């Protein structure tokens, strides 16, 4: 390979690396924002096994749990028992169809036993070998 091609390849690799670093920076800033923001926006990632793999501080706090406690409880068990079957069926069908389930309202049960109505937007995400669900909610 001649020197010009080596330079071109190196330049392309550096550009690609810069884009990855820049994207990581934006993701890091976004995560910092949703973690520390005081606005009542709930963000979580749910694993196909039914458990949360990430929830932001606001969601955990309003639910009355620590993050660790929330990671140990399947999200379906946090829903009002009267809604669990319908939500799970609708949720699964909708995500299978187009990967997005928007503007649905559920009542979550907090640690103290009170109802917390939340309007959710969810979307399937593929992260390597895992298929996570991004959940963004707004309390009513």
Image (cartoon, rainbow, N blue to C red):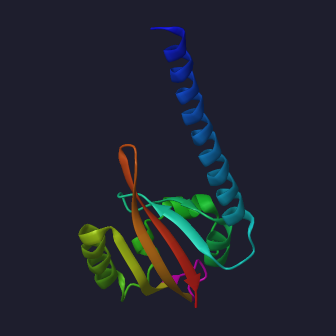
Tell me, yes or no, whether the highlighted magenta stretch contains residue 120.
no
Q: Nearer the viewer, residue 114 or 40?
A: 40
Residue farthest toward the top in the current orientation of the protein: 2
Residue 43 image point, x, y percent: 57, 68
At horizontal 54% and vertical 10% (from top left) the residue drawn is: 3
Q: Is residue 60 above or below residue 130?
A: below
Quadrant holding the C terminus: bottom right
Residue 138 image point, x, y percent: 57, 82
Q: Nearer the viewer, residue 99 or 13?
A: 13
Quadrant holding the N terminus: top left
Residue 40 image point, x, y percent: 67, 80
Q: Is residue 48 above or below residue 18?
A: below
At horizontal 48% and vertical 8% (from top left) the residue drawn is: 2
At horizontal 29% and vertical 84% (from top left) the residue drawn is: 86
Q: Describe residue 7's horizontal placement relative to residue 26 as left or right.
A: left
Q: Main secondary structure of the magenta part?
A: loop
Residue 23 image point, x, y percent: 60, 48
Q: Is residue 140 above or below residue 61?
A: below
Q: Where are the magenta residues, as a range?
A: 108-114
At horizontal 63% and vertical 69% (from top left) the residue drawn is: 60
Q: Is residue 9 above or below residue 88?
A: above
Q: Describe residue 99's horizontal placement relative to residue 114 as left or right.
A: left
Q: Describe residue 137's horizontal placement relative to residue 34 as left or right.
A: left
How many marks are shown on the rendered structure? Answer: 0
């Amino acid at each position: 390979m001649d020197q010009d091609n080596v330079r071109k390849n190196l330049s392309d690799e550096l550009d690609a690396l810069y884009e990855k670093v820049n994207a990581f920076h934006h993701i890091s800033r976004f995560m910092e924002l949703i973690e520390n923001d005081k606005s009542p926006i709930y963000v979580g990632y749910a694993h196909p096994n039914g458990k949360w793999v990430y929830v932001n501080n606001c969601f955990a706090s309003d639910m009355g749990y620590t993050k660790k406690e929330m990671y140990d409880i399947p999200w379906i068990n946090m829903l009002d028992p009267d809604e669990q079957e319908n939500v799970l069926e609708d949720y699964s069908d909708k995500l299978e169809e187009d990967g997005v389930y928007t503007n649905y309202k559920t009542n979550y049960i907090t640690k103290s036993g009170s109802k917390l109505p939340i309007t959710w937007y969810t979307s399937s995400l593929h992260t390597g070998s895992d298929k996570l669900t991004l959940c963004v909610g707004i309390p009513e």
